[in-house]
Image: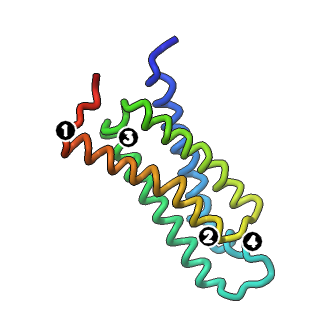
């Protein structure tokens, strides 16, 4: 059996990519996703579309923060942080895919964004602050 990093690093990368792809599906198909979720009652369509699009693009920005942190090595070799990212992106990819496929209500996506995109991005920024500014030694 190898080191923990031999399993967690590829899993983190693949699950982050899967969650990003699921989110990009919403970004590039926001009008159809909104129409499917709203059904036949399209009152307030433009407002709901703008909200979904803004949340999806903000989610992409959160992915950029995480990918920069991952490839800069700030949080790359922190096993507990990697496990948290793996769980967040695993469930995020599944639930965002189900949001698209099962035509869930549009009120669900802000929760998906907050739990599976925003929280990991804030954690990445906190880890970067602790490592770079507070000189927390991450290597043992």
What residue would you read off at disc 3?
A: 70
> Could you give the CA–CA distance between mark 3 and mark 4, rounded to whole angstroms?
35 Å
Say above or below: 136 vs 57: above
> Could you give the CA–CA distance between mark 1 and mark 2, rounded to whole angstroms?
42 Å
Q: Is residue 40 left or right of residue 59?
A: right
- Residue farthest to the right, as pictured: 40
> Could you give the CA–CA distance between mark 3 and mark 1, rounded to whole angstroms?
18 Å
Q: N-terminal of the two: label 1 or label 2?
A: 2
Q: Label 2's element?
A: helix
Q: N-terminal of the two: label 3 or label 4?
A: 4
What residue would you read off at disc 1?
A: 135
Q: Residues within 10 Å of mark 1 (few under 14, many from 20)?
A: few
Q: Label 4's element?
A: helix
Q: N-terminal of the two: label 3 or label 1?
A: 3
Q: Nearer the viewer, residue 4 or 100?
A: 4
Name which quarter of the figure residue 80 lies in.
top left
Mark 3 and 4 residues: CB-CB less than 8 Å, in contact?
Answer: no
Where residue 125 sits in the image (x, y, percent)? 33, 51
> Could you give the CA–CA distance between mark 4 and mark 1, rounded to whole angstroms?
49 Å
> Could you give the CA–CA distance between mark 3 and mark 2, rounded to whole angstroms?
28 Å
Q: N-terminal of the two: label 4 or label 2?
A: 2
Mark 3 and 1 residues: CB-CB less than 8 Å, in contact?
Answer: no
Q: Nearer the viewer, residue 137 or 28?
A: 137
What residue would you read off at disc 2?
A: 30
Q: Label for residue 36?
A: 4
């Amino acid at each position: 059996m190898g080191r923990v990093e031999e399993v967690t690093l590829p899993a983190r990368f693949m699950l982050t990519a899967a969650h990003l792809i699921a989110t990009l599906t919403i970004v590039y198909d926001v009008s159809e996703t909104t129409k499917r979720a709203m059904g036949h009652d399209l009152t307030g369509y433009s407002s709901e579309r703008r909200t979904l699009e803004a949340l999806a693009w903000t989610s992409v920005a959160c992915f950029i923060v995480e990918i920069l942190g991952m490839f800069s090595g700030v949080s790359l070799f922190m096993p507990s942080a990697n496990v948290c990212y793996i769980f967040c992106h695993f469930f995020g990819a599944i639930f965002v895919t189900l949001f698209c496929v099962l035509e869930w209500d549009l009120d669900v996506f802000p929760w998906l964004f907050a739990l599976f995109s925003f929280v990991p991005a804030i954690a990445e920024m906190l880890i970067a602050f602790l490592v770079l500014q507070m000189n927390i030694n991450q290597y043992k």
